[in-house]
């Protein structure tokens, strides 16, 4: 975006998809529906694949969904009621052949399954100075798509404006919804609550990542807390987008032991549509996605429908003034690419700096990066009213998401694109022209008004 168009752990995400290398889609744009790279081979190998079917504007989901099930006895529509722009189905070769002939279909790609692979910053970025000057993000909200939230944690108490959950139940993979009510979708108080049995593995709550991220963005200092979050005056809208899997085979396929916690692309899409609908109601400044996966990209991935599955949702958010802030991912030292969805041109891609204010060894970087923010040993809230230090670009992204809330208060006339420019113009240069955010500098002109 902007001028460029992970518990003691790092959140990087691996995929349970085709395993195909990064690149272009199977079907060039303009020649019928665009297919996700490797989808044809995946269907040939696996017989049927859980897929997202995106439609062109103006066509009802029900018509195409019915056509898929008529095309093959092996095809099955799994979810078609929540969105007007796409549905989820098990697609086999016969159903795919029918979809490729359907002018109403925009794209078909695997519903990618991702899993976390586990591997005093406010002073560094000057948010303490900005907060002292009155710029706290008051009046704005930061949406957090993650593993839910401990809503009564003292660091976040009274700050949660609403909650929602989009979490898949899929007997094929063994996925079970983490929505507290037991359904695949839920909204309202408690909808993203992490205090549920399914979040527990032994005596450990495995759904703490979202609470940690939310605290970085907008925690308010209380006794026992390390410091304020970046935007202590802002509100939080947590959305659960992960599911639980107890199948040892499925979890092993993504390199982790059971139980594992995963997020489907389709749940992320539904959650982002929800944020767009709520943007004006809650004056949402940014949405944080400390998740992603796939192969690293050094050029924008917009032409690959699977990697860029969230682009239309990001674009809709920007039209509402909401910045989609995405962790760049964690890889081998010196990795010059970013993962999906940070590779989308309309994402604000964020890398991590370490305690020496240099690029962290674990952080992805490269030409698609927009900003750096602290990501090493960041102490924030975790379930059961406690605090923990975690590392990763997952921790960097909420520094930036919170910054958008602060700057939306300080400069109410600026849109998300201009706020990004301001953060880039006022940041401290770290590597290859990519700055580390400096809120003291970014708010200095506002403080003089």
Image (cartoon, rainbow, N blue to C red):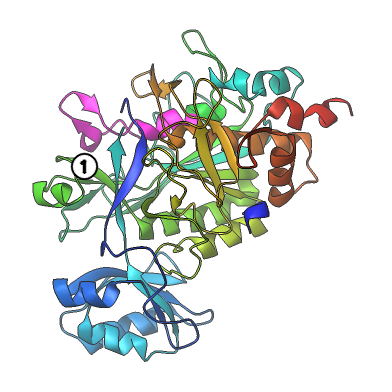
Q: Position of residue 41 (x, y in %)?
A: 23, 75
Residue 207 on the magenta span: yes
Q: How many marks?
A: 1
Residue 52 appearing in the image:
no
Q: Measured along the vertical axis of the image, is residue 12 above or below residue 104?
A: above
Farthest-out residue, right: 449
Disc 1 crowd rating (10 Å Cα; few below 14, some 14-19, many 20+) is many
Q: Is residue 131 above or below residue 304?
A: above
Residue farthest to the left?
248
Picture residue at 50% right of the left edge, 13% below the top: 226
Residue 275 located within the stretch drawn in magenta: no
Q: Residue at x 42, y 83 (%)?
A: 33
**Rendering coords of residue 422 (x, y %):** 74, 41
In this picture, residue 402 sits left or right of residue 96: right
Residue 118 appears in which quarter of the rendering? top left
Residue where numbered disc 1 is placed = 260
- Asked if residue 381 is positioned above or below residue 66 in the image, the reply reads above
In the rendered structure, the answer to whether residue 270 lies left or right of residue 448 reads left
The residue positioned 48% from the left and 63% from the top of the image is 301
Residue in the picture at 25% in, 84% down: 95
Q: Is residue 256 left or right of residue 310?
A: left
- Along the viewing direction, whichever of 257 and 218 lies nearer the viewer: 257
Question: Magenta part of the protein: which range?
Answer: 193-214
Quadrant occupied by the C terminus: top right
Q: Quadrant of the N terminus?
A: bottom right
The answer to whether 25 is drawn above or below residue 437 in the figure is below
The secondary element bearing badge 1 is classed as strand
Q: Position of residue 262 (x, y in %)?
A: 28, 47
């Amino acid at each position: 975006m902007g001028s460029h168009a992970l518990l003691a752990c790092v959140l990087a995400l691996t995929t349970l998809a085709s395993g195909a290398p990064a690149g272009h889609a199977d079907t060039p744009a303009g020649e019928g529906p665009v297919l996700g790279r490797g989808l044809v081979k995946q269907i040939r190998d696996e017989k049927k694949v859980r897929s997202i079917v995106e439609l062109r504007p103006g066509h009802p989901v029900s018509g195409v969904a019915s056509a898929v099930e008529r095309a093959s006895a092996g095809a099955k529509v799994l979810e078609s009621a929540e969105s007007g722009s796409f549905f989820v189905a098990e697609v086999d070769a016969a159903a795919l052949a029918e979809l490729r002939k359907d002018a109403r279909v925009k794209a078909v790609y695997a519903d990618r399954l991702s899993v976390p692979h586990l591997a005093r910053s406010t002073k560094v970025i000057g948010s303490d100075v900005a907060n002292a000057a009155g710029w706290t993000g008051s009046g704005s909200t930061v949406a957090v798509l993650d593993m839910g939230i401990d809503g009564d944690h003292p660091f976040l108490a009274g700050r949660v404006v609403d909650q929602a959950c989009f979490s898949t139940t899929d007997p094929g993979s063994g996925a079970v919804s983490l929505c507290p009510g037991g359904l695949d979708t839920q909204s309202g108080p408690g909808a993203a609550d992490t205090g549920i049995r399914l979040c527990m593995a032994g005596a450990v709550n495995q759904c703490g990542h979202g609470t940690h991220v939310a605290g970085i963005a907008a925690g308010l200092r209380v006794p026992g807390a390390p410091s304020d979050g970046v935007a202590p005056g802002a509100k939080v809208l947590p959305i659960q987008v992960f599911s639980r899997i107890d199948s040892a085979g499925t979890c092993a396929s993504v390199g982790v032991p059971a139980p594992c916690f995963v997020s489907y692309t389709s749940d992320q899409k539904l959650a982002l549509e929800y944020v767009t609908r709520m943007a004006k109601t809650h004056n949402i400044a940014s949405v944080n996605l400390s998740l992603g996966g796939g192969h690293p990209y050094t050029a924008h991935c917009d032409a690959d429908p699977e990697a860029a599955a969230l682009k239309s949702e990001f674009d809709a958010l920007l039209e509402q003034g909401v910045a989609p802030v995405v962790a760049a991912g964690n890889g081998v030292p010196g990795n010059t690419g970013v993962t999906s969805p940070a590779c989308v041109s309309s994402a604000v891609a964020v890398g991590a700096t370490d305690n020496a204010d240099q690029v962290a060894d674990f952080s992805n970087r490269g030409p698609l990066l927009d900003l750096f923010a602290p990501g090493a040993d960041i102490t924030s809230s975790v379930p059961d009213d406690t605090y923990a230090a975690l590392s990763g670009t997952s921790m960097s992204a909420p520094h930036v998401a919170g910054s958008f809330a602060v700057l939306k208060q300080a400069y109410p006339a600026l849109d998300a694109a201009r706020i990004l420019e301001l953060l880039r113009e006022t940041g401290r240069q770290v590597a290859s022209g990519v700055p580390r955010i400096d809120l003291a500098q970014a708010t200095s002109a506002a403080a003089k008004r």
